[in-house]
Amino acid sequence: MRGQTDMTLWLMWKLVINNFKSIRMMVVPFILSLSFIFGLHFILLSISMNDYFHREAEMITTFAIVAQFILFLLSVSFALYANQFMMHHRKKNFALSMMFGMEKKHLCFLLLIENIIEFVIIAVISVIGGFLFSLLMFMFLNKVLQRHHHVTLADFTLNMNVVWLTLLILILVMGLIFLVNIVKVTLQNPIQLVQKENNQSQRIKKVRLIILLVLGLVLLGSGYYLALTTQGIFHSLLTIFEAMLLVFVGTYCLFMSLSLFTLKGLQRIPRVYYHPVLFFSINGMISRMKTDAISLANMSVICTFLIATIGLTIMTYQGAPNLVKTLTDQRDYTTVITVENEKNKSLKAKTEKVLDDVQKYATISQLKQRYFVILGIDIKDNNVFDVAHNDQKATVQFTPEKEYNRVFNKNLKLAPNELGITENSNKLGKQKSIQIGDQMYSRVDLKDTRAMIRSTMESDIFVVVPDEQQLDQILHTLLPADKNLQNYKRVDLAFNVDEGKHALEQHSMDILKKDHVQLTNTKEMSRLVYQLDSGLIFLGVIISAALITILFLILYYKQMVEADEDQKRYALLSQLGVEGTTIRKVINQQLRWLFTLPALVAIIHTLVATKIIYKVISVLGVQNMWQFALVYFGVLVIVVVCYGLLCIGVSTIYYNIVYRGLKRPHE
């Protein structure tokens, strides 16, 4: 009995080895890609559980947890997707094995052994590779964080929980793959497996195609409209996710419908359809699009995400110093002074009092003051500004022209009936006039991104008024009669400390209690900004790496599965007398269409999204449109070129498989 068991295990082992050899073109990329993905999991876990980052930059660990969740979803989706291609490739072998007497329990045991071997290899590569790249990521993040003290690899400590958690996630994913494979094998008999192999192209009802076409056009058009008409930073932040969802769902619908309608339309043009090469190409493309539409849409969406993610990552890195400069005024301390709820106090007197108290403990220099007013208002039809009662529509920041020019180093000159406007939302629309009380003002759009960034966290609309007299008139018009104008006036203070920093830090709480003013150390603000940017960059790098891997695998497996099927089709055409040169032209034309279409759609999506992405990224300090355009379109070109190189590499493998079944033509 034991001898029989040993013999069974030996045979199973031989079968596993032979299976790995026969499907090595499928299983090796699967193992390497999953190893890379789980190496990323290891990096994320090591960063999120690192004591140094918990102590010095806790925001980074939060981003690592967010990235971990996103990567887990991508890992599960990608693993199941790749496994589906492998199982499709092996269905005929499974059917033949069952026909020749292999029981389903033996087949399940065979799959279990394969699963365990794959798990061990992936675990070893991902843990070792993940640890080495965690060291590199640790040093990279410290560089981005602008740490001034010396950081070495000795500050990086490996937590063994990282290893166990990585292996646990891998067990969950591999276990899920095994369960899916068992269900596919045990619930079908050999005939059903063969039928599924030979019945991939199904007829799609015309009514369904029309519904998908109309839905796709409406969704894509709506998404493009939102992306092209968005106004202001805040509105763009709210709109971008809605636009993305509409565009991507519309993309899937159009790939499944418009592609087939276009190809069938070409069939109705005799001089196109009956061309020797196009005849086979169009019919072949119709068959392919019935099964490949989702894969091509996936590739298009991934390329779009990849361009946007890499571009945003680079621009976030470049914009960090500008954001710090804008928020801190390049001073050591900042504060906002107000006399709200302080009776019988003038703003000017309180400002002087705060400065006197600060100078008791420290010597200050390069003092910078900015006078402005923040007010909640109601906006009625035709941009009529009115008193806000119970329904406040917008928060508006007013500042005199003189203050604006002085603070932002501008030379703006407004006529008495003009207002300089920039907004972070689309509350004013595109109208060029604004009414406040009985006075009509012409709108002058400001292009100063720094003013937009400064006001993003404080108000919806930033307004520059010609002079202080007009500002007071506007405020009296917009304020309820029972409100005190002084309560809405503000002064921004920023200054350097030449001597006495330590004393000022010690007595900052005394100043807070005495003057109700919070002094903000801009070094702490800079630290938080660099943490935010580092977290976004870290997230972008990890997601980009995962997307590149997934894109390669989709390309590779799609072509590998199709190569086996196309080999039989083209061999049959060759036997029917179709020349080898014609077959090669058909193959080349179909591959060009299949590879070019996702890239072309991704380029269109990316170009349409330019405006909304620029609005969003301006929050992170990117203030130069030309700098943005250079990075954004540079990334677009690089991604498209890399995509093309991937396609060429995958096509070479496809050609080698297909041409094995063709007779060499006498050319």
Image (cartoon, grey):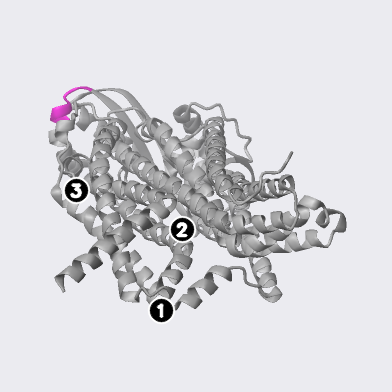
Residue 500 magenta-drawn? yes
Residue 77 rendering spot, x and y as whole percentages: 41, 60
Which residue sits at x=46%, y=40%?
A: 310
Amino acid type at image mark 3: Met
Q: Earlier in the sequence, mark 1 or mark 2?
A: 1
- Nearer the observer: mark 3 or 1; the answer is 1
Amino acid type at image mark 2: Pro
Residue at image mark 3: 49
The span shown in magenta is 498-504
Residue at image mark 2: 480
Q: Residues within 10 Å of mark 2 (few under 14, many from 20)?
A: some
Pick whichever, 331 or 34, lies toward us: 34
Amino acid type at image mark 1: Leu
Residue at image mark 1: 187
Disc count in the image? 3
Q: Which residue in the rendered view is the most extreme toward the right? A: 271
Residue 602 rendering spot, x and y as whole percentages: 58, 48
